[in-house]
Image: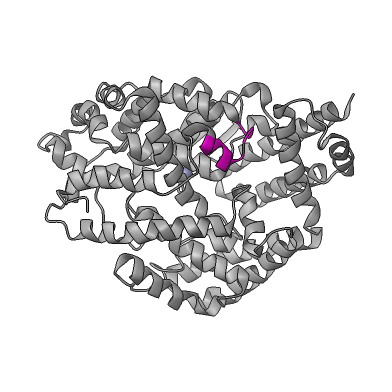
Amino acid sequence: MDAYQSLITHWRETSLLSSCAALLGWDERTYMPRAGSAHRAKQMALLARMTHERLTDPRIGDWLSQLEGATDSAEQAANVREIGRTHRRAVRVPARLVEELARVTTQAQEVWVEARAAADFRRFLPWLDRIVALKREEAEALGNTAHPYDALLEEYEPGSSSDAIERLFRALARELAPFAAKLFDAPRQPNESILRREFPVADQERFGRAVAEAMGFDFQAGRLDVTTHPFCSGIGPGDCRLTTRYDPNHFSSGFFGILHECGHGIYEQNLPREHFGTPLGTACSLGIHESQSRLWENFVGRSPEFWQHYFPKAQDAFPSLRDVRLEDFVLAVNRVGRTFIRVEADEVTYNLHIVLRFELEKNLIQGDLSPGDVPDAWNQRFHELLGVRPPNDREGCLQDIHWSFGGIGYFPTYALGNLYAAQFMEAARRDLGEAELAEDFRQGRFNRLREWLVSRIHRQGQLYRAEELCRQVTGADLNHQPFMRYLRGKYSRLYGVLPD
Ligand code: ZN
């Protein structure tokens, strides 16, 4: 076998092994009995060790050195590029550091749960201190970047840099913060209580499934189950698992949760299956993944046109909505507010929550912010961006799990997802016709949009890095303007304010 075939065969088997871990992880978060957790932890640790051994196999280095700069096609070059990236990252971080990080973050997550419940940052501080120190060590081991933070970012958004993200986020926040403030004070405000009526769980599930199916999620090749913290897991070709949670007295959390995960799921289901187990059959980046979930959740699922089709159906499904007018419902599902909690934030303010986290974690890793100063820095910046100060650290810097599991560098991908989604939607409107696409939504038809996304984004796998994919699809570098145009167009109309 030649070097390329050997490399790909080895990599496919490694992916099969990780997909076993993914399936066990799905089970752990959905159906596993509580008492099984100690045994499951052992299974997961063994699979993680076996996967790591395969990722760091010295033969990979030999194959890569024969192949780099000597591949036959753009497809082969992409596989070699991305396998090389993953292999080198795995090799550079010493086993001692990997184990130390695993040990510390497992305990830190438990402490974080208690600290958050008690709104007591001081309890979590020694652990945050330790995690930041270890992540700085990891960044140094990974090396090769202008800023240590970039080495961590690379895990989630290959090819991106903190300088580029900082420029993008600065430009965005400068326009977004004043626009959000204008909506907070707009004379027209939603009546959100119409979403807090009775929505029986079985009806929510039926309704959500029907919409996910109409959008193009294939239930012959996927499932929808219930969990505490919703996620989507692509196990492999023909098997993609969505999860959600239902609140019988709140419409939005279940329904938009399903649309969000369904967006991730449609991406996973349309990756080229012939390339499964190689970078060409893998999602481009977390930012691009998030663009697909946000696109279906917000750009489609919160659009007035979508509800022209689905609101009468929702009224059939939920008698509690029968006295509600369409325009009041649309305004309610697009409520904009000064929310302290990121996961409850609306699509206007959401990115401000991310800008704040990006700035703080970058400064932590660069050593410009000491962990003990996080609460003050958080509250001050939150006030600058959203005009209010969190009442306590539970609703401030302790709210997210990410830092406790060592996920520093993850947050920016959420905002990148929103910006990519806006830029992709502008391109889709250009290609498919703005009026025609709006009419599609009014008729509950999503196939043209989905097929456009499949051919331009999903089928590409990791052929291009995210930035290049964006240029290929939209003809421009990622920038904040499509997102701001989208918000101004939609929300100025909904809230009856002038779009500056
Ligand atoms: Zn998501």
Query: Can residue 248 be seen at all in this image of the molecule?
Result: no
Quadrant housing residue 14: top right
Choose between 111 and 465: the one closer to the eye. 465
The image shows residue 498 at horizontal and vertical percentages of 17, 51
Residue 490 lies in the magenta-colored region: no
Point out the stretch of residues depicted in magenta. 461-471
**Residue located at (40% from left, 37% from top):** 295
Choose between 161 and 35: the one closer to the eye. 161
> Count the marks: how many?
0
The image shows residue 205 at horizontal and vertical percentages of 35, 33
Residue 469 lies in the magenta-colored region: yes
Query: Can residue 99 be seen at all in this image of the molecule?
Result: yes
**Residue located at (43% from left, 68% from top):** 117
Choose between 153 and 220: the one closer to the eye. 153
In the rendered image, the residue lying farthest to the front is 475
Quadrant housing residue 300: top left
**Residue located at (32% from left, 33% from top):** 202
Colouring convention used in this rendered image of the protein: one colour
Q: Is residue 69 left or right of residue 125?
A: right
**Residue located at (59% from left, 55% from top):** 161
The image shows residue 64 at horizontal and vertical percentages of 84, 38
Q: Is residue 453 left or right of residue 388?
A: right
**Quarter of the rendering occupied by the N terminus:** top right
Q: In this rendering, is residue 427 above or below 366?
A: above
Quadrant housing residue 169: bottom left
The image shows residue 358 at horizontal and vertical percentages of 50, 62
Q: Is residue 243 left or right of residue 331?
A: right
**Quarter of the rendering occupied by the C terminus:** bottom left
Choose between 365 and 95: the one closer to the eye. 365
